[in-house]
Amino acid sequence: MSKSQSSVLATLEKAGGFLSAQQIFQSIRKQGKSTGLATVYRTLQKAASENIVDVLRKDDGEALYRLCDTGHHHHLLCTNCGKTVEIEASAVEKWANSVAKSNGFKKVTHVVELFGLCQKC
Amino acid sequence: MSKSQSSVLATLEKAGGFLSAQQIFQSIRKQGKSTGLATVYRTLQKAASENIVDVLRKDDGEALYRLCDTGHHHHLLCTNCGKTVEIEASAVEKWANSVAKSNGFKKVTHVVELFGLCQKC
DNA sequence: AGTGATTTTGATAATCATTCTCATGAGTGC
DNA sequence: GCACTCATGAGAATGATTATCAAAATCACT
């Protein structure tokens, strides 16, 4: 892991929540370190494909990233306060794959997100 | 409702599934009708704010739209040709509700969509 | 129908996140 | 030091979405 790449992950770790690629880029620059957007995106892509970070999208389509060391999972998001709960859903994974297979689809990905109001809200 | 606007909704109705704004635009043009991207987006935005259409986003951030007064179900969508298969998923419904309840969430809705390449593509 | 006012349209330009390109630089082994 | 590989990052390219704005359609009223 190169220095540039660990800056990206370190930034995410320090934030402890969701950040956009652009925010990460600016944050690293503000620390005086040299980096480029391409590197940030590359690192994030690789980390996402290795399930090191979680990706989700804001309403306007911008991607947000967060460190997640718990493998593939989904989210339960409070639509009021933004609180998120990570969900284990191996049942859903299996279901998605079998549905895809029985319809002749390949390279299947899935989106499963739950929304609601948490206890406080 | 103007003629242009109903073309957009009619296209969605005929498709019965998710379409991107770009697909809708091209589909209307292929029918020989005159339209512009701006109009398609405007119509879609308004319809979304009035809860006439559902919006969700593919992995790459592109927005997909669907008329949303049809009964609740999910889709398996070909990311290449746009073919959609409707999926019965009562198992997923139950799972979503139980997950929500065990986390103290109320008024839960969910987004479950599968993407992949169909046999032809 | 005529007229002036208001709304809608759609071609085009602008924006913004993301990806691509490629010359440069850093690191590694010999 | 030297050759070689691979990551880097500046800038260009891409693609969806949004803003602009003049022309066209529609409306309200006579």
Image (cartoon, coloured by chain):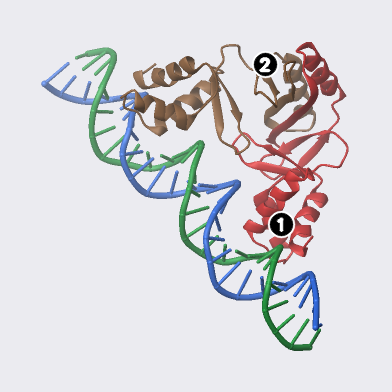
Chain colours: A brown, B red, C green, D blue
Residue on which the image places disc 1: B27
Instruction: Give me the chain letter of mark 2.
Output: A
Q: CA distance from mark 2 to mark 1?
A: 40 Å
Q: With B62 as the anchor, is C7 left or right in this view?
A: right
Q: Are marks 2 and 1 on the same chain?
A: no
- Residue A4: x and y in percent read 36, 22
- Give the image location of residue B37, x and y in percent: 63, 57
Residue B45 image offset from top left, x and y in percent: 69, 48
Residue at x 69% of width, y 28% of height: A110
Q: Secondary structure at mark 1?
A: helix
Q: Residue A21 shows which numbered tag?
A: none
Residue A56 horizontal side relative to residue D1, left or right: right
| Above or below, comparing residue B16 to residue D6 in the picture | below
> D15 above or below A113?
below
In the picture shown, does residue A50 fall above or below B3? above
Q: Against B110, is B36 above or below?
A: below
Residue B121 visible at all: no
The residue identified by callout 2 is: A85
Q: Residue at x 73, y 38 (%)?
A: B77
Is disc 2 placed on a helix, strand or loop? strand
Q: Amino acid at mark 1?
A: Ser
Q: Amino acid at mark 2?
A: Val
Q: Quadrant of the C terminus of chain B?
A: top right
Quarter of the image holding residue B60? top right
Q: Looking at the picture, tell me which residue is in the foreground, B93 or A100.
A: B93
Q: Nearer the viewer, mark 2 or mark 1?
A: 2
